[in-house]
Amino acid sequence: MGRWEPNARQRLAEAALQLYGEQGYEQTTVAQIARQAGLTERTFFRHYADKREVLFAGSPLQELFVTAVAEAPPDAALLDVIGAGLDAASDMFRGRHAYALRRQAVVDAHPELRERELIKLAALATALAGALRQRGVPEPTATLTAETAVAVFKVGFERWIRAAEETDMAPLMRGLLDELGRVAAGN
Amino acid sequence: MGRWEPNARQRLAEAALQLYGEQGYEQTTVAQIARQAGLTERTFFRHYADKREVLFAGSPLQELFVTAVAEAPPDAALLDVIGAGLDAASDMFRGRHAYALRRQAVVDAHPELRERELIKLAALATALAGALRQRGVPEPTATLTAETAVAVFKVGFERWIRAAEETDMAPLMRGLLDELGRVAAGN
């Protein structure tokens, strides 16, 4: 390891998002990001493979979501298992609304980043389906429930991020699960 | 228009899929596809922008799905509106199992084609949400229902395509809608 670089990873991510927002994603170089963060390019590459990875690498979303699903009580109803996963996913965004908003603006403005985001959500659904099967949920219920959980997460995240100020994400997700129940019940 | 070329579009698509399967997607050129179909490169480019477009262009899936949702009876329950959309989507795949299976094998083997497919499904969800809002469905119900409908379609399509022989897709989709109802009701 090099010299002491407190929070290098987070500082690089903040610097990158600032520059992406100010001068555009394409126009921003790794050298500029490192300089803005007061770090070296070498340090950048210790943390991220390239400037795209700053936006995607190391998000614990999938791990948190899947772990919560795996560790829900064995006798929990399927909807509560999903609710536990959504709670865990929501927790990780607490206090990060401003950052998430800036990140999303960059992602939404670039089709290749949007594609990468969709790939990550598809991978999340696959991992959730696996965790549900491990709990003994049969197919096609496991895959259907996993895909539906990701659908709820997508809609909830979009609503959370669009709000003018940060709100608590978990109740928003729970409200969507309730709404899904109403739609599926034909009410 | 050039000389009479019966079913040129479909012949080109069949030829492309055959070559993609036999010799690989990367290794296949437009010239080879045209030759295999007994047509010219010029004809190919009248129908498709490039060899990727053969796999994606001109699918009426979104139009059929959205039109069925838009034209469902005004007083239909939301779940039945989605069911009508899934029925219309299912209809277009009738008799096309072998073709769809070969197409999917190529798409699944190439991350950039898989990304394109996910983009198309995301666009489908956006279009469905718009059609539901047009029907007077408020947000977030419209977007949540649209994303859920696409989740059901994804799961149902995957099950349909994995079956050894072609089965009727619509009952499969309806079965998943019922299953979703059971999950959402906590049963």
Image (spheres, coloured by chain):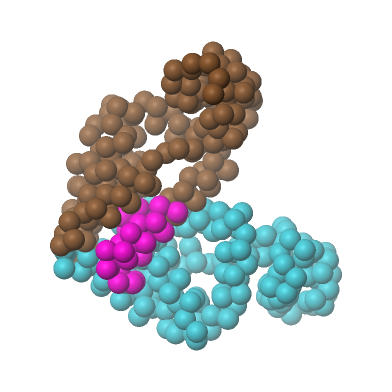
Chain colours: A brown, B cyan
Which residue is at 36% across, 65% downward?
A: A143
User: Where are the magenta residues, as a range?
Assistant: A123-150
Write down the quadrant of residue A1 in the picture: top right
The residue lying toward the viewer, choosing from B55 and A41, is A41
Q: Is residue A41 above or below residue B16?
A: above
- x, y percentage for residue A176? 23, 49
Q: Specify whether residue B91 is in view.
A: no
Residue drawn at (44%, 85%), measured in percent from left and top? B167
Find the residue positioned furthest to the front.
A1
Q: Which of B26 and B148 is in front in this view?
A: B26
Q: Which residue is drawn at 41% across and 59% down?
A: A126
Residue A88, percent from left and from top: 27, 43
- Quadrant of residue B132 within the rendered picture: bottom left
> Considering only vertical position in the picture, is B8 above or below A143?
below
Is residue A137 inside the magenta stretch? yes
Quadrant, the N terminus of chain B:
bottom right
Q: Is residue B107 visible?
A: yes
| Front position in the image: B114 or B75 | B114
Residue B10 is situated, as x and y percent measured from the top left of the image, at 68, 75
Magenta-drawn stretch, dominant element (helix, strand or loop): helix
